[in-house]
Amino acid sequence: MKRIAALACVVVLIGGALSGCAVKAGDGDLTDDWAMMSAPKVPEPETGSCWTTSATEVSDLTPSNVTQTTCDLTHTFETAKVGHFSGTAANSSSPPSPSQLADAWTDCDKAVADYLGAEWQAGRVYVQVTPPTSRQWTGGARFYRCDVASLRTEAGIFDPRKETMKGTLASGGELRLTCGTQVGTTNDSWDDITPAKCTDPHDVEYVGFVSSPTNDYPTGSKAVDDAFSKACEAKMLAFIGMSRSSWSSQKSLYYGYWMTADKDEWTAGNHTARCYLMIDKKKINRSLKGAGDVAV
């Protein structure tokens, strides 16, 4: 049983004088004039807030291992925007599933680009739409965070930092993708790219990103090729300014792509892949942007 503290007025007789509590004119009831306390509300994060995680790479990330921290300390994520669910998603009894995040994803895609200074796919970054936890949702929270993290490489290894990520993909920004070297290359795949300056020896260069029109998550090499191959080929040729006749005679030049989404992120609306020009068994020390019909 809860104990309720009562408001008491103590009357003391000292030296024949009465001292105590004065009561203003009224009905004498001290309990009916108090305003009702507002219902407790789940604290809402703010744009620019920072987060840390015990996960070292994207594949290990879970809501339970992400906690808020101050931005002057080393952190993994920054919140580029805080949005709010509405309609059917907001009226659900539980946080939205990936298939209900399409509107939030569209919003975050633009918000993160504005925050970073360019499309996030053009940088060593990872983007996540973060809805409330089940407990927060039950408490009335209907916000989502547009979170962004910096990566060391395409393999999804987080690169925690103390400096803000804001503006890091603007012209000359430190996280912009440019050139690099291939890691773990086989006849039809590669494992990673190590960043490098375009004036240093390299065999990879970022040429842009594409978005697949298909709604089905591609599984298997053929489905992935169907989703991205032709679009990335065209992106590479446009980047170099190379004609198809010149392209058909190249011996060392080819292209590759890296999907930026897992199945849940694809369902939410991220259908993009980064496209790269790649060079076989040799390295160059300049950018091929605008190089035209050169022999590589």
Image (cartoon, grey):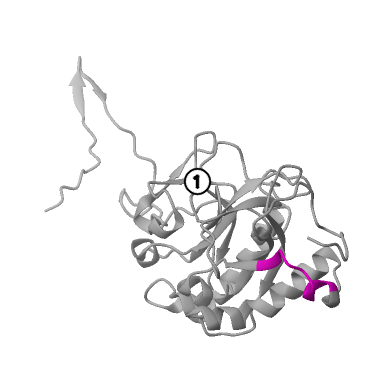
How many numbered marks, from 0 up? 1
287 sits left or right of 2 in the view: right
Which residue is pictured at 80% across the width and 57% down the height? Answer: 288
Which region of the structure is painted magenta?
A: 246-255
Q: Quadrant of the C terminus?
A: bottom right
Instruction: Give residue 237's position: percent from left, percent from top.
Output: 80, 70
Which residue is pictured at 55% across the width and 50% down the height? Answer: 151
Height in image: 15 above or below 62? above
In reply to whether residue 73 is colored magenta, the answer given is no
170 sits left or right of 33 in the view: right
Which residue is pictured at 48% across the width and 80% down the height? Answer: 220
Query: Depth check: 62 or 138 in front?
Result: 62
Instruction: Give residue 128's position: percent from left, percent from top.
Output: 52, 61
In reply to whether residue 248 is colored magenta, the answer given is yes
Instruction: Give residue 185's position: percent from left, percent from top.
Output: 54, 60
The residue tagged 1 is 76
Q: Secondary structure at mark 1?
A: loop
